[in-house]
C-alpha cells in the first residue's frame, strides 16, 4: 500500500471533503456501457450530451500497490480496473474506440474492467494526466467500484504516475505497461522473452522511484539484510538501478547472439531463393487463422490481443507448385510502446526483407482504415516500404458489406477473404502466385534422366514453361534462379 490510511478511511475523508453533489455535476450520471457490440447504439441526442460532459464514465480498473522488493519487473496482476482516457482530438467515436481497445487490452492482461471515463481536454495535464479535479472524481469512482487499479490510455511520465497514484490511492498504470505485461505473458521463445524483459526494464528504470517509494521507506531504517552488494552510501534505489542496468547489458548481448542465429537461418532461406511472404497486420486481425488456412499449420488462434508473439515460418506452395515461406508475425497496435518497437525490430525486419507482405486487416472492425494506417506506420518505421503489399480484408463473413466495398474501392491491391469460412482463399492463393518474384533466368536444357533432381528443383524453385520427355532426357524450358541455371548449364544444348 502506498498510503498509510486504509481504503475505508480514505473513503470517509473523501466524502467529507467532496460532498455528493459536486461530483454529480461534472460527471455524466448515466454510465456509458463499455462494450464494442453496442457502440453503435447511441443516437444524436446522447452524442450531444456526451460532448458536453467533461468526464464520461466508461469502466473500472485497479491493482494493488506492491513493493518492488526484487529488481525483477513486477507482474501487474491487474484484477479490477477503471480505465481513463484523455480525449484531445477527433470525434467521440474515436475516443470511444480507443478506450474500447484499452478495455480489450486490459481484458487480455486478465483484468476485469469495471468502469471507464474519458475527459475532454486540449492536452493531458502535465502533473496528473487528467485534471486535478477530475482526478478526485476518479478517486470516487475507484472507491465506488472497488477497483484496485487505474489504467490510463497513454504513456504517462513517471511524475504523472506518482501524482495520480497519490490522488486515487490505488495503483496507476499506463497503456505501455499494460502492453508490456501482455507481451510478457505471451512470449514463448527464449528470444521473445528476452526482448520483452529488456523492454520492461527499460520502461521501469526511470519509474523505479515512483514504484519503489514504499520500498525505499521499508529499506530505510537500517534494514536490508543480505544486501552485501551495496556499496557504502548507495541507496536501495541506486542499487536497483545499477543491477537493472547490468542485467540489461547482459540481456542485450544474449539477444544479439540469438539474432545472429536467426539471421543465418534467414540467409540460408535467401540463398535457396525460396520467396518469402510475411503476414503482418493489426493484433487480432486473423493473421494466425490465415496462416492456418493457407498452410494447415496448427498455430494458436485466440480471440485475444497479441496471441502470437513468436514468429512462425511455414512452407507453402502456390497452386502452380512454386514453393515459398509464409511467416506469421507479431500483431501491431496503435501507439506500440516505443521500447517494444525497438525490441521487436528484428522480428519486423523480417517483414521488411520479405518478398511480399500480406497485410491482414479485420474487415469487421468499425474503422479498419485506422488499423491499416497504424500498421503502415510501423512498416515505414522499419523501412519496409518497398515490399509489395496485398491488403487482405479478413473476417468478410462478419463484416459490414458497406465497409468491405469501401475498403475494396480505396485500398490498392485488396482482396476480401474469410479465414474462418475459406471464402476468397483460392483467389488469394492465386494472387500470391502472381505477386511472388519471378526467377530471372530463362533456360532450355536437356536434362539426363540420371539428374531428375534438377528437374524437380526447377518445378519447386522456378517456373517450368514446358517439359518434354525425349529418349536423351527431359527437355526443359524454365525460368530459374542463377544458381540453378549454373547447375543446368552443362545440359544446355550448344549455342546456335
Ligand atoms: N468471423 C471471423 N472471425 C475470424 C476470422 N479469422 C479469424 N477470426 C477470429 O479472430 C480472432 C483472432 O484470430 P487470430 O488468428 O488469433 O488473429 P491474429 O491476427 O493472429 O492475432 P494476434 O496473434 O493476437 O495478433 C479469433 O477469435 C479468430 O477465431 C474470420 O474470417 N471470420
Ligand atoms: Mg496470431
Image (spheres, rainbow, N blue to C red):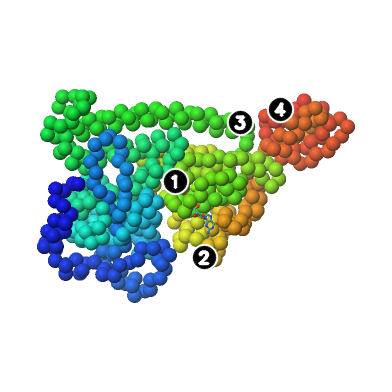
Query: Could you tell whether 480 is left or right of 266 in the image?
Result: right
Between discs 2 and 1, the one toward the N terminus: 1
Q: Which residue is mark 2?
A: 400
User: Is label 2 in a helix, a strand or a loop?
Assistant: loop
Image coords of residue 2 (percent x, y): 18, 46
Circle 1 packing at 10 Å, graded few (<14), some (14-19), many (20+), is many
Circle 4 packing at 10 Å, graded few (<14), some (14-19), many (20+), is few
**Quick one: 190 or 323, which is closer to the camera?**
190
Residue 4 appears in view: yes
Q: Which residue is mark 4?
A: 486
Q: What separation in Å lies between label 4 and label 1 (alpha carbons)? A: 39 Å
Image coords of residue 334 (percent x, y): 40, 51
Q: Please name the residue shown 43% across and 37% down the image.
A: 192
**Quick one: 494 or 262, which is closer to the camera?**
262
Between discs 4 and 2, the one toward the N terminus: 2
Q: Which residue is mark 3?
A: 271
Q: What separation in Å lies between label 2 and label 1 (alpha carbons)? A: 27 Å
Residue 51 appears in view: no
- Front: mark 4 or 3: 3
The quadrant in which residue 423 appears is: bottom right
Report the residue that reaches farthest toward the bottom. Answer: 45
Label 2 close to label 1 by CB (< 8 Å) = no
The quarter of the picture where the C terminus appears is: top right
Q: What separation in Å lies between label 3 and label 2 (alpha carbons)? A: 44 Å
The tag on residue 378 is 1
Image coords of residue 5 (percent x, y): 14, 51
Between discs 3 and 1, the one toward the N terminus: 3
Is 486 placed above or below 332 here?
above
Between discs 4 and 1, the one toward the N terminus: 1
- Front: mark 4 or 2: 2
User: Is label 3 in a helix, a strand or a loop?
Assistant: helix
Q: Please name the residue shown 54% across and 58% down the image.
A: 395
Amino acid at each position: 500500500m502506498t498510503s498509510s490510511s486504509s481504503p475505508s478511511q480514505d473513503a470517509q475523508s473523501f466524502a467529507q471533503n467532496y460532498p455528493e453533489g459536486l461530483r454529480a455535476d461534472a460527471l455524466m450520471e448515466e454510465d456509458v456501457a463499455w462494450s464494442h457490440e453496442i457502440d453503435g447504439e447511441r443516437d444524436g441526442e446522447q452524442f450531444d450530451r456526451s460532448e458536453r460532459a467533461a468526464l464520461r464514465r466508461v469502466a473500472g480498473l485497479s491493482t494493488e500497490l506492491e513493493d518492488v522488493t526484487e529488481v525483477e519487473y513486477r507482474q501487474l496482476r491487474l484484477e479490477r480496473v477503471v480505465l481513463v482516457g484523455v480525449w484531445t482530438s477527433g470525434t467521440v467515436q474515436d475516443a470511444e474506440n480507443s478506450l474500447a481497445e484499452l478495455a480489450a487490452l486490459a481484458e487480455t492482461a486478465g483484468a476485469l474492467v469495471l468502469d471507464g471515463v474519458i475527459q475532454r481536454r486540449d492536452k493531458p495535464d502535465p502533473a496528473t494526466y487528467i485534471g486535478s479535479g477530475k482526478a478526485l472524481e476518479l478517486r470516487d469512482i475507484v472507491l465506488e467500484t472497488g477497483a484496485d487499479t487505474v489504467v490510463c490510455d497513454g504513456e504517462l511520465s513517471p511524475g504523472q504516475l506518482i501524482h495520480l497514484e497519490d490522488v486515487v490511492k490505488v495503483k496507476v498504470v499506463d497503456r505501455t505497461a499494460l502492453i508490456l505485461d501482455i507481451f510478457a505473458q505471451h512470449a514463448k521463445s527464449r528470444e521473445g522473452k528476452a526482448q520483452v524483459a529488456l523492454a520492461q526494464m527499460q520502461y521501469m528504470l526511470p519509474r523505479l522511484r515512483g514504484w519503489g517509494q514504499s520500498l525505499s521507506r521499508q529499506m530505510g531504517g537500517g534494514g536490508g539484510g543480505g544486501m552485501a552488494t551495496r556499496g557504502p552510501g548507495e541507496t536501495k534505489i541506486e542499487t536497483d538501478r545499477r543491477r537493472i542496468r547490468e542485467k540489461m547489458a547482459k540481456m542485450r548481448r544474449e539477444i544479439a547472439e540469438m539474432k545472429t542465429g536467426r539471421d543465418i537461418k534467414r540467409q540460408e532461406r535467401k540463398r535457396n531463393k525460396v520467396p518469402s511472404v510475411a503476414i503482418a497486420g493489426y493484433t487480432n486481425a486473423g493473421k494466425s487463422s490465415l496462416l492456418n488456412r493457407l498452410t494447415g499449420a496448427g498455430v494458436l488462434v485466440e480471440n485475444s490481443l497479441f496471441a502470437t508473439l513468436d514468429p512462425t515460418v511455414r512452407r507453402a506452395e502456390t497452386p502452380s507448385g512454386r514453393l515459398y515461406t509464409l511467416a506469421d508475425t507479431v500483431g501491431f497496435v496503435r501507439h506500440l510502446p516505443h521500447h517494444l518497437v525497438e525490441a521487436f525490430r528484428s522480428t519486423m525486419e523480417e517483414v521488411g526483407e520479405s518478398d511480399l507482405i500480406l497485410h491482414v486487416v479485420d474487415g469487421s472492425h468499425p474503422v479498419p482504415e485506422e488499423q491499416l494506417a497504424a500498421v503502415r506506420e510501423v512498416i515505414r518505421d522499419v523501412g519496409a516500404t518497398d515490399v509489395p503489399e496485398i491488403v487482405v480484408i479478413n473476417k468478410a463473413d462478419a463484416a459490414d458489406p458497406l465497409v468491405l466495398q469501401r475498403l475494396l474501392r480505396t485500398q490498392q491491391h485488396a482482396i476480401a477473404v474469410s479465414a474462418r469460412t475459406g471464402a476468397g482463399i483460392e483467389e488469394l492463393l492465386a494472387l500470391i502466385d502472381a505477386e511472388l518474384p519471378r526467377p530471372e533466368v530463362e533456360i532450355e536444357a536437356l536434362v539426363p534422366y540420371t539428374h531428375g533432381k534438377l528437374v524437380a528443383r526447377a518445378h519447386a524453385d522456378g517456373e517450368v514453361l514446358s517439359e518434354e520427355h525425349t529418349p536423351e532426357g527431359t527437355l526443359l524450358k524454365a525460368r530459374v534462379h542463377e544458381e540453378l541455371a549454373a547447375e543446368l548449364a552443362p545440359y544446355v544444348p550448344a549455342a546456335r
